[in-house]
């Protein structure tokens, strides 16, 4: 049943899929608790957002919105073992859409500030701590290194926004990029 539903949803308009998803979410109905099914839905709608030929800009944005909402659902409702990966996918899609369609302040998909705010809200260590860990990688406990790697992984969603100066905290993001480069240099040696 759920594979058939997934196939049918991919054939519908983005407006219909959004309406279906919002109904499911608001009523608390669970089509399935299978994370892979939800990831497939998110990836399929993300694909539709920037790779499928569309008629209108609004269709691209609607598909992107659905994908982002599904990724958020995965991160917050499905007991995902890696909710940060669903969040990263949502933010990376936002970044792709901003690159394709341009930034738009206060827009659910196209506002670069959402990505910037998410990055800093989820960075649970200071840049000073990050530099200390990067300089002492071999002596750092695995849990702290993992925490830092997750923060640095999130930089993917910010790269082009920094290059285009579409965020306020460019200098701070560049510091995080320096930490990433320092770690890469340290592990390459």
Image (cartoon, grey):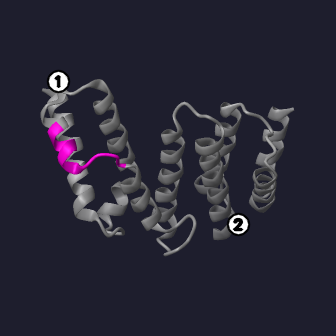
Q: Where does residue 176 sit, x and y in percent of width and height?
A: 25, 50
Q: Is residue 182 left or right of residue 87?
A: left
Q: Residues within 10 Å of mark 2 (few under 14, many from 20)?
A: few
Q: Position of residue 87 (x, y in %)?
A: 51, 47
Measured along the vertical axis of the image, is residue 151 above or below residue 138? below
Q: Nearer the viewer, residue 27 or 171?
A: 27
- Decide: is 112 above or below 83: below
Residue sitting at x 32%, y 43%: 152
Can residue 12 be found in the magenta stretch?
Answer: no
- Principal SS element in the magenta part? helix
For the view shown, which residue lies furthest in the bottom direction?
105
Judging by the rendered image, the residue that carries numbered circle 1 is 138
Along the polypeptide, which appears first: circle 1 or circle 2? 2
Disc 2 marks which residue? Answer: 55
Q: Quadrant of residue 81 in the image?
A: top right
For the point 33% across and 67% down, the residue is 164
Image quarter hosting the C terminus: top left
Q: Are marks 1 and 2 in contact (CB under 8 Å)?
A: no
Which residue occupies 29% across, 65% down? 169
Mark 1 vs mark 2, CA separation in Å: 53 Å
102 versus 135 height, above or below:
below
Seen in the image, is 173 located left or right of residue 28?
left
Q: Position of residue 137 (x, y in %)?
A: 18, 29
Residues in magenta? Answer: 123-132
């Amino acid at each position: 049943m759920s594979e058939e539903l997934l196939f049918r949803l991919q054939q519908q308009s983005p407006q219909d899929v959004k309406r279906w998803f919002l109904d499911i979410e608001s009523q608390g109905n669970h089509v399935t608790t299978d994370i892979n099914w939800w990831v497939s839905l998110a990836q399929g709608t993300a694909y539709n957002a920037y790779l499928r030929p569309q008629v209108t800009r609004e269709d691209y944005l609607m598909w992107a919105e659905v994908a982002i909402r599904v990724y958020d659902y995965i991160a917050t409702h499905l007991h995902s073992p890696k909710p940060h990966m669903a969040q990263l996918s949502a933010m990376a899609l936002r970044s792709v859409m901003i690159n394709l369609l341009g930034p738009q302040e206060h827009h659910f998909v196209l506002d670069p500030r959402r990505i910037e705010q998410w990055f800093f809200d989820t960075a649970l260590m200071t840049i000073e701590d990050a530099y200390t860990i990067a300089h002492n990688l071999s002596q750092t406990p695995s849990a702290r290194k993992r925490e830092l790697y997750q923060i640095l992984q999130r930089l993917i969603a910010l790269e082009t926004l920094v290059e285009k100066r579409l965020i306020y905290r460019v200098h701070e993001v560049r510091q995080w990029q320096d930490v990433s480069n320092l770690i890469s240099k340290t592990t390459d040696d």
